[in-house]
Image (cartoon, rainbow, N blue to C red):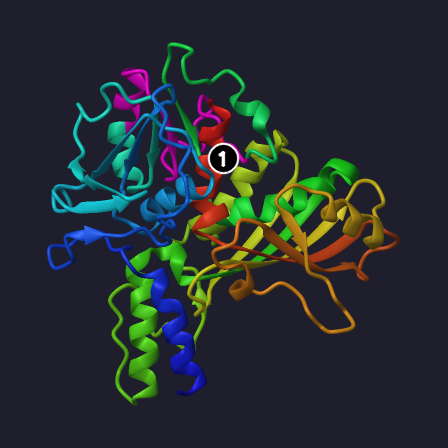
């Protein structure tokens, strides 16, 4: 078997069960990682909160279930919600079968925490409904990120933003999950920012198919096979060939020439850091990687920060692993962080275009579906307990 075939086989498990719930799909969905039947589960607890997962048949929805299992998240009941076309399907979770229910305004009666990943329009419609019923919503869409009344949270970065929200406090609310690129970037940059204060940040992203959903991941596999077989590639998700190619991120272009993805990084960084003066610019590129984003980040500081000190700060930062072996030319890769919780940082070096130790370059990789989405949301939910 050639190396490409091996690579395709290696990535197929990322796609299992991640579809949006079309009628042709199997009626039984298994999360991306299954739990050993011999492991004793401590998470099902009658004194724990009731949980709902909205958009459970999507890629991030399935990852919610995997992360809940991996972290032994406590719950007394679990409700799985999706669109009408997915209602009635069976999802196996922690050796129990659950029936997917159609999302409606009564879905949140008695629910303490709801994890949303069903798109902005669904969040805008049902997020406030859930909050009024006393549910705390953790929303993975962009619907509420820039709402001044909604905390935008990365637990390792700004946990204080949601200090007034707790399960059992008698009120619901909405907490926004930042964009995946913002989470991955700020996980690495914030520890350095705390030491030397970032004045300006230039980010170039190399974003995987997973950021566009399970259908995009499937199409990348399909296109790769088609191109290798000499066929015209199927282009349903993007309007151009994705396999063996890269292109500017497919988000809509704004009047200022930036696309929405780039402006998310700019605006969300300022909100999360509570610093409207920090200068941020970004260029976001879609690359033919199955899962996990990479980012090149150039930093300019107010205070000096040498590369050795920066490397030591990163080594001690929560959720970060440093992969910075110059002798072996080994640095972070998307493949190595796929299905991993930690964000990897490497290529830590002084920016030679700036005088003294006032600038650094780093290279960052993180799993877009895990820390960039589902893991961050579940960590927020843990802080609500």
Q: Residue at x 16, y 36 (%)?
A: 101
Residue at mark 1: 379
Closer to the camera in the image, 261 or 100: 100
Circle 1: element type: helix
- 319 with respect to 2 (left or right): right
- Coordinates of residue 197 in the picture (x, y in percent): 75, 38
Q: Is residue 155 visible?
A: yes
- 186 with respect to 180 (left or right): right
- Rendered position, 336 above or below 168: below
- Coordinates of residue 88 in the picture (x, y in percent): 12, 43
Closer to the camera in the image, 175 or 142: 175
- Rendered position, 160 above or below 83: above
Residue 47 falls in image quadrant: top left
- Coordinates of residue 359 in the picture (x, y in percent): 78, 52
- 18 with respect to 165 (left or right): left
Residue 247 falls in image quadrant: bottom left
Judged from this view, the residue extending furthest toward the right is 356
Q: Main secondary structure of the magenta part?
A: loop
Is 150 in the magenta?
yes
**Quarter placement of the N terminus:** bottom left
User: What range of the chain is rendered magenta?
Assistant: 127-154
């Amino acid at each position: 078997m050639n190396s490409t075939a091996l690579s395709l086989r290696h990535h197929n498990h990322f796609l299992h069960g991640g579809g949006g719930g079309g009628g042709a799909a199997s009626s039984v969905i298994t999360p991306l990682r299954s739990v050993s039947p011999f492991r004793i589960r401590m998470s099902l607890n009658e004194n724990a909160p009731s949980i709902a997962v909205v958009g459970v048949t999507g890629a991030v929805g399935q990852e919610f279930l995997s992360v809940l299992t991996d972290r032994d998240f406590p719950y007394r009941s679990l409700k799985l919600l999706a669109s009408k076309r997915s209602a009635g399907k069976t999802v196996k979770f922690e050796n129990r079968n659950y029936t997917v229910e159609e999302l409606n305004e009564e879905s949140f009666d008695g629910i303490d925490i709801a994890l949303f990943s069903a798109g902005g329009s669904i969040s805008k419609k049902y997020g406030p409904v859930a909050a009024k019923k006393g549910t705390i919503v953790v929303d993975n869409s962009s619907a509420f990120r820039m709402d001044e009344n909604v905390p935008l949270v990365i637990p390792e970065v700004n946990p204080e933003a949601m200090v007034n929200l707790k399960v059992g406090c008698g009120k619901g609310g909405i907490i926004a999950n930042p964009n995946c690129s913002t989470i991955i970037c700020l996980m690495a940059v914030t520890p350095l920012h705390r030491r030397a204060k970032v004045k300006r940040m230039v980010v170039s992203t190399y974003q995987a198919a997973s950021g566009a959903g399970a259908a995009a991941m499937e199409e990348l596999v399909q296109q790769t096979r088609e191109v290798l077989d000499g066929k015209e590639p199927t282009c349903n998700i993007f309007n151009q060939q994705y396999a063996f190619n890269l292109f500017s991120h497919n988000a809509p272009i704004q009047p200022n020439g930036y696309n929405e993805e780039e402006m998310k990084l700019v605006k969300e960084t300022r909100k999360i850091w509570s610093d409207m003066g920090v200068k941020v610019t970004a260029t976001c590129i879609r690359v033919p990687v199955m899962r996990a984003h990479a980012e090149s980040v150039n930093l300019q500081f107010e205070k000096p920060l040498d590369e050795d000190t920066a490397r030591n700060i990163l080594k001690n930062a929560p959720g970060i692993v440093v992969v910075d072996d110059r002798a072996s030319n080994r640095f972070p890769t998307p493949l190595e962080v796929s299905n991993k919780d930690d964000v990897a940082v490497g290529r830590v070096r002084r920016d030679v275009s700036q005088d003294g130790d006032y600038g650094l370059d780093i290279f960052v990789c993180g799993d877009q579906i895990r820390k960039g989405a589902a893991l961050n949301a579940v960590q927020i939910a843990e802080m609500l307990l």
